[in-house]
């Protein structure tokens, strides 16, 4: 009986590494939960009207932006004035990595971001404090739950001539181009519509209501998530890529067949 109790105690004993494993799992779960919460609530934690936020943004601006835009954001020969540009413009340009510029060129190129989301919002708060301008979009218009059919019609009327009907982008004049909209965050799509970066026109609420913009975002998410019913998209560039494909593949097959027939006849 004593031996049976001893064996029972041994079988119920934990492995020496069990405690370490449990602590590690707990830390991983806690870290993942905190990271997810911080990402979803980062914008909410930043008060754009707070004086401390504006002051931090002014420091960032003086250190990283004033060389081109001037100490008071009034502009210089190297960069335009940002007075009245609004928080949405700053959040779009800095949040997509276009600003600060990598080099002077026909238009700002997308690159890895140099600032965190909090720093971007602080910069936006400072510029917004200088003069009224387009503000950050409301989250209710960024959910992708609008009318995709209405958004598609609006996109074809207002956007497709530059961005392509499939939002794959297209070439413009003087070395400029309309970028692809695949993978672009809904926030940045909305901000681009209300601020009109670079060659893009401004679509204020008189041109496209907030709900219209929400419908366009829904359409963009729809065409990005749904597979092409036509099969291989070839970059969604239309006759250009299709003609090149037919020319290269078709002519290749014809030449190969001609060589084969000639070799057989000999």
Image (cartoon, helix red, strand yellow):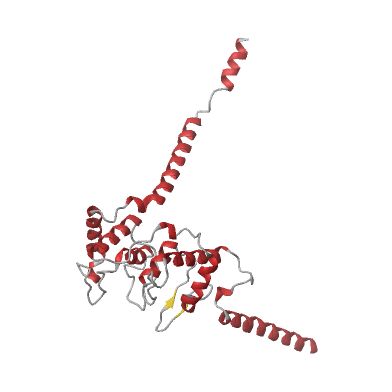
Q: Is residue 131 above or below residue 157?
A: above
Number of numbered markers: 0
Relative to 31, 166 lies left or right = right
The image position of residue 170, as x and y in percent, is 48, 78
* Residue ID at (73%, 84%): 257
In depth, the one of 44 and 240 nearer the eye is 44
44 over 113 or under it: above or below: above
Quadrant in which the C terminus is drawn: bottom right
Quarter-of-image position of residue 198:
bottom left
Give how far across and how far down residue 116 sits, in percent. Answer: 34, 57
Q: Residue furthest right?
A: 265
- State whether residue 168 appears in this view: no
Which residue is at a point 45% across and 73% down the rendered structure image? 179
Q: What residue do we see at 41% from left, 47% from top?
A: 37
> From what the image shows, is residue 7 above or below residue 211?
above
Quarter occupied by residue 30: top left
Q: Looking at this view, is 256 or 247 the one in front?
A: 247
Tell me the quarter of the image containing the N terminus. Answer: top right
Percent position (x, y) of residue 60? Answer: 25, 60
x then y, percent, for residue 224 = 54, 65
Q: Is residue 14 visible?
A: yes
């Amino acid at each position: 009986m004593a031996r049976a109790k001893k064996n029972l105690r041994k079988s119920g004993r934990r492995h020496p590494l069990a405690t370490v494993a449990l602590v590690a799992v707990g830390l991983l779960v806690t870290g993942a939960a905190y990271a997810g919460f911080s990402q979803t609530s980062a914008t909410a934690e930043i008060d754009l009207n707070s004086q401390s936020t504006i002051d931090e943004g002014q420091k960032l601006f003086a250190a990283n932006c004033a060389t081109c835009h001037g100490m008071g954001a009034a502009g210089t020969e190297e960069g335009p004035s940002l007075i009245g540009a609004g928080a949405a413009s700053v959040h779009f340009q800095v949040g997509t990595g276009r600003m600060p510029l990598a080099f002077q060129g026909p238009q700002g190129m997308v690159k890895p971001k140099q600032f965190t989301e909090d720093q971007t919002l602080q910069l936006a708060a400072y510029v917004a404090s200088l003069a009224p301008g387009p503000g950050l979009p409301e989250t209710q218009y960024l959910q992708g739950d609008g009318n995709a059919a209405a958004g598609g019609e609006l996109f074809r009327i207002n956007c497709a001539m530059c961005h392509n009907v499939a939002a794959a982008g297209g070439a413009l004049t003087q070395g400029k181009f309309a970028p692809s909209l695949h993978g672009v965050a809904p926030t940045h799509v909305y901000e681009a519509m209300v601020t009109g970066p670079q060659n893009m026109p401004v679509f204020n609420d008189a041109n496209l209501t907030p709900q219209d913009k929400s419908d366009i975002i829904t359409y963009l998410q729809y065409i990005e998530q749904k597979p092409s019913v036509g099969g291989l998209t070839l970059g969604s560039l239309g006759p250009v890529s299709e003609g090149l494909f037919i020319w290269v593949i078709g002519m290749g097959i014809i030449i190969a067949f001609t060589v084969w027939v000639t070799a057989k006849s000999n």
